[in-house]
Image (tube, helix red, strand yellow):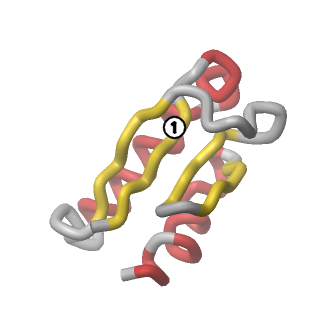
Amino acid sequence: MIKLYTCVGSACHLKGSYNVINTFQQMIEENKLNDKVEVCGSFCLGHCSEDVSVKVDDDYFAVKPEMAREFFEKNVMSRI
């Protein structure tokens, strides 16, 4: 199972982390990936100076809320 951590700390919250999480959850539902991908909230992932911090497996990313769908397709779907 892929664990998809999204920072919900103060800086990332202000940058739209809940929009990112909602998009990820929509993508999981649309693609019937409930048994393959788990979305987890996390506090500081150490990249708060950029966009919303996201960790997939051991890789860290900065994700703009408006790019969350594209990010999911490229960085999560490719691991399934």
Identified at 41% across, 42% down, the residue is: 22
18 lies above or below 74: above
Q: Quadrant of the N terminus?
A: bottom left
Badge 1: few (under 14), some or many (20 or more) residues near its Cα, within 10 Å? some
Q: Residue at x 63, y 16 (%)?
A: 10
- Place of residue 48 in the rendered image (x, y in percent of width and height, measured from the top left): 74, 32
Instruction: Point out residue 6 in the picture as x, y percentages from the top left corner.
Output: 50, 41
Q: Is residue 56 above or below residue 11?
A: below
The amino acid marked with disc number 1 is Asn
Occupied quadrant, residue 65? top right
Task: Specify whether 51 is left or right of 67.
Answer: right
Q: How many marks?
A: 1
Q: Which residue is mark 1?
A: 19
> Among all residues in the image, which is located at the extreme front?
58
| Placement of the C terminus among the 4 image quadrants | bottom left
Residue appearing at x 51%, y 37% in the figure: 19
Q: Residue furthest left?
A: 35
Identity of the residue furthest to the right in this view: 49
Residue 50 appears at what percent x and percent y?
81, 40
Label 1 residue SS = helix
Q: Position of residue 77 (x, y in %)?
A: 44, 77
The residue sitting at 51% across, 74% down in the picture is: 73
Above or below, 43 relative to 58 = above
Which quadrant holds residue 26?
bottom left
* 58 displayed left or right of 47: left
Relative depth, front residue between 77 and 55: 55
